[in-house]
Amino acid sequence: MIEQYYDDESQVEWQRLERHRTEFAVTMRALTDYLPPAPQAILDDGGGPGRYTLALSALGHQVTLLDLSQGNLTLARQKAQESTISIHQYVHGNALNLSSLHAENFDAVLLLGPLYHLLTDPERQQAIGEAWRVLRPGGLIFAAFITRYAAFRDLAKNTPSTLFEQRAAWEETLRTGIYHASQGVGFTDAYFAHPAEIGPLMEQAGFKTLDLLGCEGVVARNEEQVNQLTGEAWQAWVDFNYRLSKEPSLRGAADHLLYVGSKPSSSSIHSMPYCRA
């Protein structure tokens, strides 16, 4: 179902980060702040049509784009050709099984899409464990989550009567984070994370937490006017929202959260739960 959704909606997904410029700009600021100078070997794991793959490749990084959807990969190739940016590798694959990729082969892993499509904790742990396996000691992970409350903001803005009509389902989403496509906000079945769950989930896999950012700053669902800005006026808002993205009290008000973590150096790897000989 997820593969078919993105095969059908690859153009929509590409355009999504044009509509939500702050999410992209804040995420890119975090990536460039934390990544060492290029070239770094980066896996964009579940990277969709390659927005971040292209941006990081343009900065000189060696990026492998892996995605479940052939439609996304086809669009990524097209966009790379149009922009004359060279992408290191395209892989049709699943974040739950990266066996086609060598262990400890990447300096950084981007896990910016898969985790909110995995409905069970064991599946999320498996995807994080696979990212751990292919990441070199000392490497960085960037993992994105949709917040528990994002769907409720969308519901209030677009179809508020649905809360009454499907009250039990939405109560379950609030309690567990599980959302079903039948609830009608135009998405697949999904998992929406509570901000307090994210650090423990990633640390359970062995990662050291470096940061947790609210990608929209203060403009979630309220960005239309900001998106029309250009030049220094736009950059001022990027700077401001990046600063505010690190404010813990605003995390639940964001639509997306970006976890930044590191895999400990080899001296302490032996104690980590997802390390395998």
Image (spheres, grey):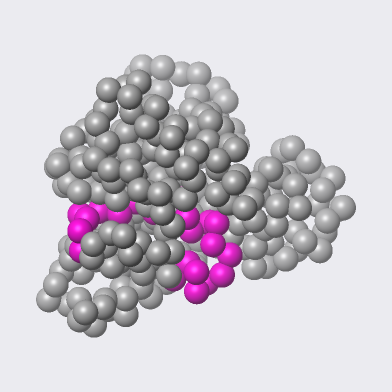
What residue is at 28 percent from the left and 67 percent from the top? 133
Q: Is 76 on the left or on the right of 59, as rendered?
A: right
Residue 132, position in %: x, y? 30, 66
* Residue 240 against residue 245 in the figure, above or below: above
Q: How many marks?
A: 0
Which span is picked out in magenta? 104-125
* Residue 82 against residue 188 in the figure, above or below: above
Q: Is 66 on the left or on the right of 60, as rendered?
A: right
Residue 136, position in %: x, y? 19, 62
What residue is at 74 percent from the left and 43 percent from the top? 156
Residue 217, position in %: x, y? 46, 41
What residue is at 87 percent from the left and 52 percent from the top? 165
- On whether residue 113 falls in the magenta region, the answer is yes
Taking depth in this image into account, of 198 and 97 the one nearest to the observer is 97
Would residue 262 be visible to someone looking at this image?
no
Task: Classify residue 65 by image quadrant.
Answer: top left
Task: Classify residue 167 by image quadrant.
Answer: bottom right
Seen as rendered, the residue at the extreme bottom is: 271
Seen as rendered, the residue at the extreme right is: 165
Would residue 267 be visible to someone looking at this image?
yes
- On whether residue 151 falls in the magenta region, the answer is no
* Residue 121 against residue 8 in the figure, above or below: below
What residue is at 53 percent from the left and 56 percent from the top? 116
Q: Is 82 on the left or on the right of 74, as rendered?
A: left
Taking depth in this image into account, of 160 and 139 the one nearest to the observer is 139
* Residue 235 against residue 179 in the figure, above or below: above
Residue 112, position in %: x, y? 42, 50
Q: Is 62 on the left or on the right of 10, as rendered?
A: left
Locate the C terminus and report the quarter of the image it occupies.
bottom left
Taking depth in this image into account, of 10 and 203 the one nearest to the observer is 10
